[in-house]
Image (cartoon, rainbow, N blue to C red):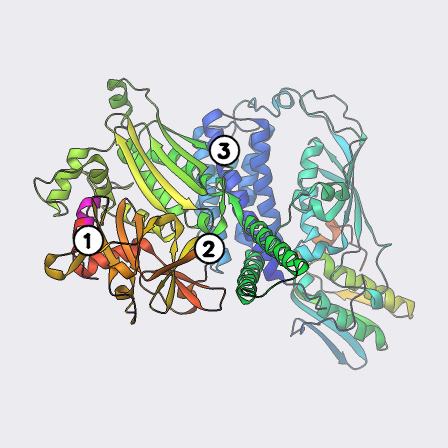
Amino acid sequence: MNMQIDLKRFQETFFEEAEEHLGTIEAGLLQLSESGADAELLNTIFRSAHSIKGAAGSFGFTELARLTHVMENVLDGLRSGRRAASSELTQKLLRASDRLRDLVAATRRGEAASVPTDDVVAELEAELAAPQGAPHAAPAAAAIAATAPAESVHRIEFEPAREFFRQGQDLFLLLRDLAELGTVESIECRREALPALEQLDPESSYLSWVVRVRTARPVRELRDVFLFVEDACRLEVTTESPAAVASPAAPSMPASERRSGTQRRAEASTIRVPTGKVDALINLVGELVISQAMVNQAITGFELTPQLAEALAVVQRSTRELQEQVMAIRMLPIGTVFNRFPRLVHDLGMQLGRKVRLEIEGAETELDKGVIEQLGDPLTHLIRNSVDHGIESAADRVTAGKPEEGVVTLRAYHEGGNVMIEVADDGKGLDREKIRAKAIAQGLVREGATLSDEEAYALIFAPGFSTAAVVSDVSGRGVGMDVVKRNVESLNGAITVKSETGKGSRFRIRLPLTLAILDGLSVRAGREMFILPLLSIRQSVRPQAEDVKTVLGGRGEIFVLRGEQLPLLRLSRLFHIAGAVEEPVNGIVVVTETDGHRFGVLVDDVVGQQQVVVKSIERNYRKVESVMGATILGDGRVAFIVDVAELLRVATRRRGTDETEPARAANAATAGEGV
Amino acid sequence: MVAPENAHVPPAGDSIRIETSEGLTTLRLEGAIGVAQARALHARALELASQGGDVTVRASLVSHLDAAAVQVLIALSAALKSRGRTLAIADLPVSVSHTLQLAGLGTAL
């Protein structure tokens, strides 16, 4: 067994935890600015800053430790009541927290030096050095401020667990932090557990300490020193001499209150596992699902004994359950991405001088980690747009009979095996006529063309489309909504928009629960197999000869479905497959829909519906046009999984028509496609 | 926990080295000696314990010494003492000495 400590691994854990703490700090500071000082809130922010500082010091990330140290001092002043919370101070702390985020990211890349911190550190140090007025009635310590704090002597027994060092911890730093909270009356290092040199494991911890500290600080603060290591130590804090003057606001923790690390460990209900390990497990289960399909195929036609048939059924059921359980491991609450937006809305509101509030619903809705990671950018853009273009100025809102404060709502919920995310605002709504005029000016729509609301609003997703009269710092650069659409589609999702003049707009994103498996329809073209995502399929039809018509001088085909004319694409022609069905009557038309565009896909045969494990082609080979991935079928053959939206775009582009025309225009254009 | 026989001992490089000159054995430490260096330090300590004579630790170039390193040095000191030999620490930088005092280890080495 290799016992060498892999500090890199611990550092990775530190960075992940630092991200979480940064989120807590930021959310806490925002709440502080909105609802004022609150003891528990200040403690929460303080603890997160403290945790980052402690671990950063252990890893030798001195700049991180320096910045968090000064933040911690300011926060400590707030929670002890020595300093008053003000919006100016909160802004300074938010600036420091932004810089801290940059610094954490840069340190992770090994480029800590690229992020200067002197200015924010100096700003906070100036705050610390500035004379404070009368003691502030901070909620945690109003009474302490009013009366002279009484000192107590606390006995702290601290025994790091054997594996303490393997967590990358430097316990001398903890002892130093402890000493800074008061006067160390005595400190004893116990060495009874230290084995002889020959038996010593140098990466295990054997020493323990008994420290007696005289301080006016509450026991909670003494415990906070060990916050980051509470699961890796035994800690007992007892108060030896009671405070001379009882302080009603800061009662000493009773001596009977002892909480050992062992007890705390028992409370831990989660474990932290690297994503790579989960992905490897998912991959393996994917292979198992494929093998299972192969077994099923191999036994087709055999007469099975009842026992064997039952055993196979059990294996099949267990495999499916295993797959579902493993997939569930990758699921994260969408709140992990939603949490960044209160800050965004707060900052945008300040920047634009608008009163705006963000309401979040369904933050607990779970979604695949891979999907969540890619949602940040599109959602940021939609929210920016809502605040910048949607919400009116306070004066305009009052004139329109609305409350001064605008509301942007971010909502997530499940609907029919998908996750829906909505970004809605109660602003002025999209200006249909302005969009139409702009689209005509940009040549996206013909003059005089009639557009339904849906078609008009869909134009905002066209590349370079923006109706903003002034290009602002916030949005309106004419890029973005098309990127939002592409981002969503790359997640196998779709985005739509609804709007009502004077009442607001609502963007709705539909996403699959996961990218790793997909419900698909397996179809055949020539000797090749393809998978069409079930989500996009409306129905399959064996066409009659009169249902298929040639248009545009033989360059395109349409399929008539109950009077509705749909563009018809031949899969075999798009993928250049020889030996496929030529006469449509000998094949099947799969009616497919993407972004409101309906079209028919002609295939030789529909083989069946199945759940497939998506394998990336891009990662293993290169991007293949109109293909989102591949899968291995039960008979061992590889089948492409068709990217339906891209298939339509490619077909449209080959004909040379702008793909961003609204549904009717695109459908009409694609009807002329000779594929 | 006892380190397994085949535990990997990282190369100490130049930061932990044994020098013997005119019958004097010196363990020279440089830079940060922490948990990442503890196994290498332990390996050198075992070498020193198996040799004869007193040992002086030269630590003037040590920037940081953590508890994992300190407990190896304490164990080495005890091992030498049981053999009638001594371990002396020389030139410990003030900052490191201060840290050890704060940790109640001012007289441990």
Q: Which mark is residue A130?
A: 3
Circle 1 residue: A546
Label 1 lies in what chain? Answer: A
Task: Assign the C terminus of chain A to one quadrant of the image.
Answer: bottom left
Q: Is residue A138 visible?
A: yes
Does the magenta run of residues contain A666?
Answer: yes
Q: Amino acid at mark 2?
A: Gln
Vertical placement of B22 versus A567: above or below? below
Please give left or right for residue A281 compared with residue A588 in the image: right
Front residue (pair B71, A133): B71
| Mark before the other along the chain sequence, 1 or 3 | 3
Circle 2 residue: A610
| Mark before the other along the chain sequence, 2 or 1 | 1
Q: Say which element carries label 2.
A: strand
Residue count near mark 1 (Cα–Cα under 10 Å), binned few <14, some 14–19, many ≥20:
few
Residue A17 spot, x, y in % from top left: 57, 48
As measured in the structure, the alpha-carbon distance from the residue carrying label 2 to the one carrying label 1 is 32 Å
Q: Report whether mark 2 lies on the same chain as mark 1.
A: yes
Does the magenta run of residues contain A20?
Answer: no
Residue count near mark 3 (Cα–Cα under 10 Å), binned few <14, some 14–19, many ≥20:
few
Q: Which residues are magenta?
A: A662-667
Residue B84 spot, x, y in % from top left: 91, 70
Please give left or right for residue A322 compared with residue A122 in the image: right
Comparing marks 3 and 2, which lies closer to the viewer? 2
As measured in the structure, the alpha-carbon distance from the residue carrying label 3 to the one carrying label 2 is 69 Å
Q: Report whether mark 3 lies on the same chain as mark 2.
A: yes
Q: Say which element carries label 3.
A: loop
Kindly identify the residue that appears in the image at 82 percent across and 63 percent down: B75
Q: Amino acid at mark 1?
A: Glu
Comparing marks 2 and 1, which lies closer to the viewer? 1
Task: Assign the N terminus of chain A to one quadrant of the image.
Answer: bottom right
